Image (tube, helix red, strand yellow):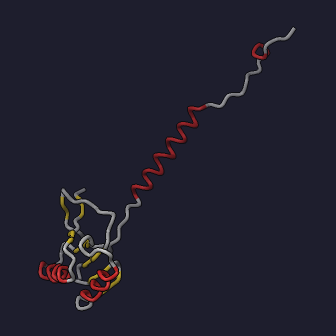
């Protein structure tokens, strides 16, 4: 007579799904957190003024950074104030549509208005009208 295997103390092997689901969930949380902490920053480190309505744009065409010493960086390349118009003209020549070109301006909060407006004036004379002055978020 054949006795079912459950009566002899032999159990069929089973894959436990709950620990597997826990591990997959933890991996998912880890990778989401890792991706959020790797935010794209295309500017150089400057101390930005804060704003409660500040947003970070990730699709940038041009980035201009002016640090507290008044040094100007166009897409992380240092340029002088006198060379900035020529560098912007070169960038606009390479662009297909200058009207849709956007410049994100990162200016240090200790920078004087006069220096900031000099840079803004150069950007406007280069034919770029879409300028966004960046600010840090309140933490």
Quadrant position of the C terminus in the picture: bottom left
Q: Residue at point 27% right, 77% down?
A: 64
- Give residue 19's quadrant in the image: top right
Q: Is residue 35 above or below residue 61?
A: above
Q: Relative to the observer, which residue lies in front, 59 or 55?
A: 59
Q: Is residue 25 left or right of residue 53?
A: right
- Note whether residue 106 is visible: no
Q: Relative to the observer, which residue lies in front, 127 or 106?
A: 127
Q: Is residue 113 above or below residue 56?
A: below
Q: Position of residue 1 (x, y in %)?
A: 87, 8
- Give residue 80's quadrant in the image: bottom left
Looking at this view, name the residue that lies furthest to the right. Answer: 1
Q: Is residue 20 left or right of residue 78?
A: right
Q: Position of residue 121 (x, y in %)?
A: 15, 81
Looking at this view, name the residue that lies furthest to the bottom. Answer: 82
Q: Position of residue 96 (x, y in %)?
A: 32, 75
- Note whether residue 12 is visible: yes
Q: Relative to the observer, which residue lies in front, 58 or 23?
A: 58
Q: Residue at point 47% right, 49% down?
A: 30
- Give residue 124's quadrant in the image: bottom left
Q: Relative to the observer, which residue lies in front, 81 or 70?
A: 81
Q: Residue at point 19% right, 67% down?
A: 49
């Amino acid at each position: 007579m054949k006795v079912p295997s459950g009566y002899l103390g032999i159990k069929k092997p089973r894959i436990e799904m709950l620990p597997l689901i826990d591990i997959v969930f933890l991996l998912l949380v880890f990778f989401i957190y890792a991706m959020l902490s790797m935010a794209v920053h295309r500017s150089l480190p400057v101390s930005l003024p804060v704003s409660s309505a500040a947003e970070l744009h990730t699709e940038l065409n041009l980035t201009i950074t002016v640090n507290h010493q008044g040094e100007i960086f166009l897409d992380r390349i240092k340029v002088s104030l006198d060379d900035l118009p020529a560098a912007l003209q070169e960038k606009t020549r390479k662009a297909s549509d200058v009207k849709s070109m956007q410049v994100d301006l990162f200016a240090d909060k200790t920078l004087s208005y006069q220096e900031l407006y000099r840079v803004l004036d150069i950007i406007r004379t280069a034919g770029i009208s879409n300028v966004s002055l960046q600010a840090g978020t309140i933490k």
